Image (tube, rainbow, N blue to C red):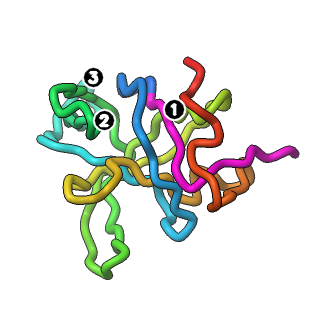
């Protein structure tokens, strides 16, 4: 199996959520992928539990707001890098990374004060990529 070489930062797309472009910090130390979410609200759709939220996918465009909806798999306790534990919604969605597409788990949390609104964790990258930390944005913008 050939693996794609990625940098320490990469452009991603989450098309099922309506997010055409978002910068992600690649973090092999993080187990799960995390996505910033504002205004989280749980609701029932067709008898299933869903969550809706909004985010600003591009920090350089604070006027751009994407409203998202997704069926959530579960609520899970996640321990952050600073050691605090938080209950988060876990969703499953398609990730476009370069020319490749994967179905990944994503936790929803407040990343407003973080440098990146998306953290790409090792579960999403497992057996798919190799990270070359010397470089950034090796894959360019995803091909939709």
The first of marks 1 and 2 along the sequence is 2
Q: Position of residue 91 (x, y in %)?
A: 39, 43
Q: Is residue 119 left or right of residue 102?
A: left
Magenta run includes residue 134:
no
Report which quarter residue 38 is drawn in: top left
**Residue plotted at (37% across, 75% down):** 81
Q: Label 3: few (<14), some or many (≥20) within 10 Å?
A: few
Most prominent secondary structure in the magenta stretch? strand
Q: Label 2: few (<14), some or many (≥20) within 10 Å?
A: some
Quadrant location, the C terminus: top right
**Residue plotted at (69% across, 58% down):** 132
Q: Is residue 117 left or right of residue 125?
A: left
Residue named by callout 3: 46
Q: Which residues are magenta?
A: 1-14
Q: Secondary structure at mark 3?
A: loop
Task: Mark yes or no: residue 71 visible.
Answer: yes
Q: Position of residue 31 (x, y in %)?
A: 51, 65
Closer to us: mark 1 or mark 3?
1
Task: Mark yes or no: residue 50 visible.
Answer: no
Quadrant location, the N terminus: top right
* Alpha-carbon span between mark 1 and mark 2: 19 Å
Residue named by callout 1: 94
Whether 106 is drawn above or below 141: the answer is: below
The first of marks 1 and 3 along the sequence is 3
**Residue plotted at (64% across, 36% down):** 139
Closer to us: mark 1 or mark 2?
2
1 and 2 marks in contact (CB < 8 Å): no
Residue named by callout 2: 58
């Amino acid at each position: 199996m050939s693996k794609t070489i990625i940098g320490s930062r990469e452009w991603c797309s989450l098309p099922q959520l309506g997010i055409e472009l978002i910068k992600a910090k690649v973090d092999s130390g993080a187990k799960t992928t995390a996505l910033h979410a504002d205004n989280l609200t749980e609701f029932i759709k067709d008898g299933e539990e869903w969550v809706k939220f909004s985010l600003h996918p591009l920090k350089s465009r604070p006027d751009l707001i994407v409203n998202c909806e997704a069926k959530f798999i579960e609520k899970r306790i996640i321990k952050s890098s600073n050691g605090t534990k938080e209950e988060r919604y876990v969703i499953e969605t398609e990730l476009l990374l370069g020319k490749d597409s994967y179905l990944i788990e994503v936790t929803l949390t407040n990343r407003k004060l973080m440098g990146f609104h998306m953290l790409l964790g090792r579960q999403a990258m497992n057996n798919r990529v190799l990270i070359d930390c010397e470089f950034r944005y090796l894959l360019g913008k995803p091909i939709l």
